[in-house]
Image (spheres, rainbow, N blue to C red):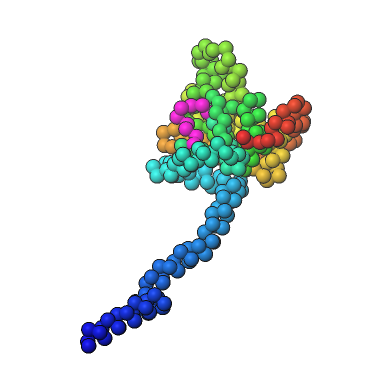
Amino acid sequence: MNRIIKLIIAASCIFSLIMFPVACGGGDDTAEHKAPVKKAEAKPEVKHEATSVAEKKAKPSPDEAIAMLKAGNARFVDGISNHPNINRARLVQAGKENQGDHAYATVISCSDSRVPVELLFDAGVMDIFVIRVAGNVCDTDEIGSIEYGLCHVNTPVLVVLGHTQCGAVTAVTHAVHGTGHALERNIPPLVDNIEPAVRLAMSKHPDVHGNDIVPHAIEENVWQGIEDLFMASPASREIVTSGKAKVVGAIYDVGTGIVNWLPESKTTDILENVEANPDRAMDAMAGGGHAEEAAGGGH
């Protein structure tokens, strides 16, 4: 009799489990059944991802871009670089997207191998539009490259970056002192923009002689580059005056890794002096057939 009763109870429990899962301990199965539905409803994550892409393409302000460069250099100096944007995913992105949506700075620096621009600012692929030339001079080719960086890659800052122990400035200083050596035929036209900076440094520091004047000439060469840029580039003057971008000077110390930032007020003074100079270039746009090509910007 007891055996028959046990069989009836077991059958009832099985029937209840099939018809009413909450009964007879079926609650866990129900929770597992509901979990996929809950995940399917979690749509805010997809929306957040789309927002991140949009934010990624938003350019920082000039001051924010300068702050990013300073923070990157601080990491580099401290030996804790993040090495951002150098993975395979960034390369795939670079192959599909416009650099103008990403680059946050244009930097003109010396070609010296001791000045690795992206590394010293802890930057990666599509972060910095770099122009490198011996002596970080601003002549026609370099100014054209800067205009492309500011006007088409749309970077909110230009850094004219000198560096300690600059061989080009040292060579010109020696030439001015009459102690220089013969140079290959194409080098003097390259570095002739540096001579006014050397002579100005000598006039400002008459008590400094020999190689001791070189550090002063290196700084004056940064200011000379900014003046040359503003004199030859109405587009650069306009973009700075409008507040769309800033032009700043800096000097990189090759022995410490530190970028020393020069006063921004000096750039303002140079721009004001250039605007009052009747010899400044006035036509911002070229008259050739490259305008339509350049309008594509930043590819």
The secondary structure that dominates the magenta segment is loop
Query: Which residue is most to the left?
Result: 2
* Residue 53 position (above or below residue 256): below
Give percent across and percent down for residue 202: 56, 26
Give percent across and percent down for residue 243: 68, 46
45 or 253, which lies in front?
Answer: 45
Res. 123 visible in picture: no
Query: What residue is shown at x 77% (from left), y 27% (from top)?
Result: 287
Q: Is residue 283 left or right of residue 251?
A: right
Q: Which region shows up in magenta?
A: 110-118
- Which quadrant, please, contains the C terminus? top right
111 in magenta: yes
Query: What residue is shown at x 45% (from left), y 29% (from top)?
Result: 114
Query: What residue is shown at x 50% (from left), y 32% (from top)?
Result: 163
* Residue 259 position (above or below residue 214): below
Give percent across and percent down for residue 292: 73, 32
Q: Is residue 168 left or right of residue 144?
A: left
Q: Is residue 8 left or right of residue 104?
A: left
Query: What residue is shown at x 51% (from left), y 39% (from top)?
Result: 92
Where, by quadrant of the figure, is residue 148 drawn?
Answer: top right
Give percent across and percent down for residue 265: 62, 43
Query: Which residue is most to the bottom?
Result: 1
- Which quadrant, please, contains the N terminus? bottom left
158 or 222, which lies in front?
Answer: 158
57 in magenta: no
170 or 19, which lies in front?
Answer: 19
52 or 286, which lies in front?
Answer: 52
